[in-house]
Image (spheres, rainbow, N blue to C red):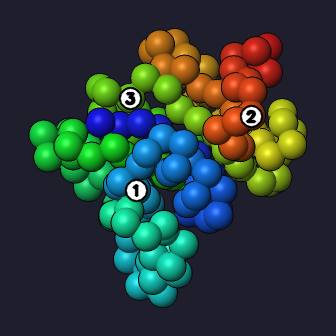
Amino acid sequence: MIKLLRVDDRLLHGQVAFAWTKNLKINLIVVANDTIAHDEFTKMTLGLAKPQGVNLTIVEVKKATEILNTEKVKKYSTLIIVNNLVDAQRIAESVEEIKSINIGGIKEREGSKRYTNAVTLTDDDIRICRELIEKNIEVEARQMPVDKKQLIKDLIK
């Protein structure tokens, strides 16, 4: 069962690895990123950040959608992590089970505007959020599971 699709430009780090996996009782983390899937050093580094007893798969976005649509993955309590909204949209639109996207952290970039302490969005990011919301996919901002959920639709009015 997919528990969370998270956008975090840092991918797998302490907050995700421990707070979210413990809170959601995660036993499979899928990092979906076309570049990192072929970067052995980064894959090794991310592997060091995963909690003991949790499986980690690092694959291209297309491969992630294939995996997430199998019966086998339903046996796991799954956390999906991407580092941008483009990849989150690709996954959400290809995996019917996903009804919500958590934006945990997107750092400041050229043309971005700050919406929370940890989330900045560009015009393209806002367009993607609106498209997802139109498809009845909740998009929310929250760094930690104990934080109050902030709906992006309320922040980007």
- The residue type indicated by label 3 comes to Ile
Secondary element type, mark 2: loop
Residue sitting at x 48%, y 68%: 50
- In the drawing, what numbered circle is on residue 144? none
**Pick the front one: 63 or 31:** 31
Q: CA distance from mark 3 to mark 1?
A: 15 Å
Q: Are marks 3 and 1 in contact (CB under 8 Å)?
A: no
Residue sitting at x 54%, y 42%: 23
Q: Could you tell whether 102 is left or right of 147 in the image?
A: left
- The residue type indicated by label 2 comes to Asp
Q: Is residue 55 above or below residue 89?
A: below
Q: Nearer the viewer, mark 1 or mark 2?
A: 2
Residue sitting at x 12%, y 40%: 71
- The quadrant in which the N terminus is found is top left
Give the x, y percent position of residue 149.
70, 26
Q: Identify residue for label 3.
A: 98
Residue 94 in sight from this viewpoint: no
**Pick the front one: 46 or 82:** 46
- In the drawing, what numbered circle is on residue 29? 1
Q: Could you tell whether 64 is left or right of 50 in the image?
A: left
Q: Could you tell whether 93 is left or right of 85 in the image?
A: left
Q: Identify residue for label 2.
A: 147
Give the x, y percent position of residue 11.
57, 60
Q: CA distance from mark 1 to mark 2?
A: 21 Å
Q: Quadrant of residue 54?
A: bottom left
Q: Quadrant of residue 94?
A: top left
Q: Nearer the viewer, mark 2 or mark 3?
A: 2
- The residue type indicated by label 1 comes to Ile
Residue sitting at x 52%, y 50%: 22
Residue 1 in sight from this viewpoint: yes
The crowding category of the residue bearing disc 3, from other C-alpha atoms within 10 Å (few below 14, some 14 to 19, many at least 20), is some
Give the x, y percent position of residue 128.
58, 30
